[in-house]
Image (spheres, rainbow, N blue to C red):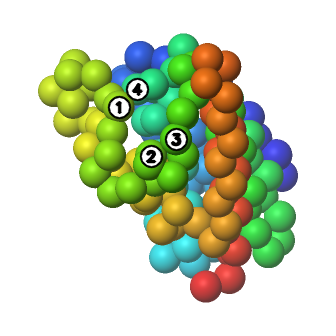
């Protein structure tokens, strides 16, 4: 099963729509609730990162019998130092984003913690691709 979602930069009202939709599908497929929670947390963090940092993005979700693969692609400023960005508490979020309660520097670390596999590639001035794979059996 494959799904695609558009993510609009700056639109915090719609952040989490893809995660919510994927959660419903996984519940219908009787996936373990603990696994669903991990997937939803990782995907939500990815969506918020796109909304907070990029102009726009796309979420591609591929659900197989044994795993879920998520690709979050954005058009934005990119990440100059991925290792630094993976550190808990590091954030480049604007003051406005922080005032809304986002940008605490937990997004990428939470994505890594809740996925079985993560791959991040980024080009400064172009955008970022985050690929997450989570096994559906606990």
Mark 1–mark 2 Cα distance, whole angstroms, equals 9 Å
> Residue shown at 68%/54% (left/top)?
119
Q: Earlier in the sequence, mark 3 or mark 1?
A: 3
Q: Earlier in the sequence, mark 4 or mark 2?
A: 4
For the residue pair 116 and 86, the one nearer the viewer reads as: 86
> Residue shown at 43%/58% (left/top)?
109
Decide if residue 99 is in sight here.
Answer: yes
Determine which residue is flagged by label 3. 81
Q: Secondary structure at mark 4?
A: helix
Contact between marks 1 and 2 (CB within 8 A): the answer is yes
Is residue 96 left or right of 1 when viewed as pictured?
Answer: left
- Classed neighbour count for the residue bearing mark 4: other residues with Cα under 10 Å, few (<14), some (14–19), many (≥20): many
Determine which residue is flagged by label 1. 92
Tell me which corner region of the image, top left, top right, bottom left or bottom right, holds residue 41: bottom left
Determine which residue is flagged by label 4. 52
Contact between marks 4 and 2 (CB within 8 A): the answer is no
């Amino acid at each position: 099963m494959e799904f695609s979602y558009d993510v609009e930069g700056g639109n915090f009202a719609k952040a989490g729509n893809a995660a919510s939709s994927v959660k419903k599908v996984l519940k219908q497929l009787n996936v373990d609730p603990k696994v669903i929670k991990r997937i939803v947390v990782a995907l939500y963090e990815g969506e918020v990162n796109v909304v907070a940092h990029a102009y726009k993005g796309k979420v591609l979700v591929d659900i197989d019998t044994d795993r879920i693969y998520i690709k979050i692609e954005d058009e934005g400023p990119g990440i100059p130092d991925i290792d630094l960005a993976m550190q808990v508490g590091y954030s480049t979020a604007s003051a406005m984003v922080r005032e809304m309660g986002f940008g605490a520097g937990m997004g990428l670390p939470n994505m890594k913690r809740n996925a079985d596999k993560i791959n991040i590639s980024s080009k400064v001035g172009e955008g970022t691709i985050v690929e997450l794979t989570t096994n559906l059996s606990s």
